[in-house]
Amino acid sequence: MTYSTCTLLRAENNEVFDRFLAEHGNFEPLPIFDGDYCKTFLYETDQTDGFFVASAKRVR
């Protein structure tokens, strides 16, 4: 599962995704960004518009 937003606000990014993981025990973070499950992209470092992406996988 991928969660993505076009905002840089932590309250709309990490906090929402972490709350989802806490409330849905059948998902776990999927590290796809240099060992991390989430990444905030910025123009200054990634030469793109600012956005957030997080990844998880369903576990049984």
Image (cartoon, grey):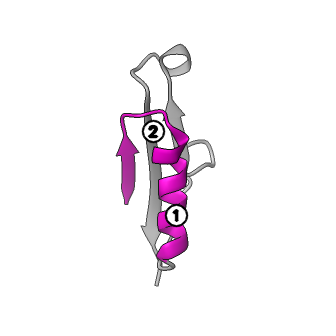
Residue at the right extreme, as displayed: 35
Tell me the number on the disc at residue 52.
Answer: 2
Q: Image check: 6 left or right of 26?
A: left
User: Magenta stretch containing residue 14, yes or no?
Assistant: yes
| Figure check: 15 above or below 9 | below
Where's residue 13, x and y in %? Answer: 48, 46
Q: From which residue to which does the magenta span run?
A: 1-24
Q: State the quadrant of the N terminus.
A: bottom left
The answer to whether residue 29 shows anywhere in this view is: no
Query: Label 1 amino acid?
Result: Arg
Tell me the number on the disc at residue 19.
Answer: 1
- Dot 2: what SS? strand
For the point 44% across and 43% down, which residue is it?
53
Query: Label 2 amino acid?
Result: Phe
Residue at the bottom extreme, as displayed: 60
Cα–Cα gap, marks 1 and 2: 16 Å
Where's residue 37, x and y in %? Answer: 55, 52
